[in-house]
Amino acid sequence: MTNGKEISREKSLPFTKINYMVMGAALLTIILGYISLNSGSITLAPILLVLGYCVLFPVGLIIGGKKNEVEQENI
């Protein structure tokens, strides 16, 4: 039978500093996209929003996953 610490370790998300930096850049890009959308830009705003939502945020979630899987197997 496992104790509570092992269960919480298995369910925690394995994000590193790189993940948080990329997701922060995604959030900043999305905010800038909405600001430029509010100012009337019809070319820059969609580019920033697609870059933030469809590229940077998923990359922030995925990057470094294989490294963390190997570390969890060693634990």
Image: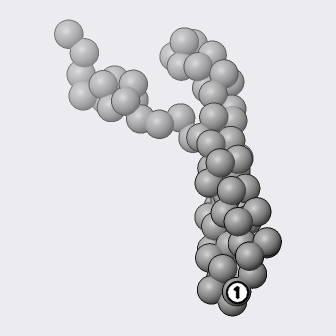
Residue at horizontal 30 percent and vertical 25 percent from the top: 7
Q: Quadrant of residue 41?
A: bottom right
Q: On screen, 43 above or below 65? A: below
Question: Looking at the picture, which amino acid does disc 1 mark?
Answer: Gly
Q: On screen, 19 above or below 7? A: below
Callout count: 1
Residue at horizontal 66 percent and vertical 79 percent from the top: 37
Name the spot of residue 29 as percent of width and height, x first. Answer: 70, 67
Q: Mark 1 points at which residue?
A: 40
Residue at the bottom extreme, as displayed: 39
What kind of colouring is applied to the model shown? one colour
Quick one: 55 or 14, which is closer to the camera?
55
Residue at horizontal 67 percent and vertical 63 percent from the top: 49
SS category of the residue bearing label 1: loop
Name the spot of residue 6 as percent of width and height, x first. Answer: 34, 23
Name the spot of residue 32 as percent of width and height, x first. Answer: 69, 76
Quick one: 24 or 75, which is closer to the camera?
24
Q: Can residue 62 be seen in this view?
A: yes
Quick one: 66 or 26, which is closer to the camera?
26
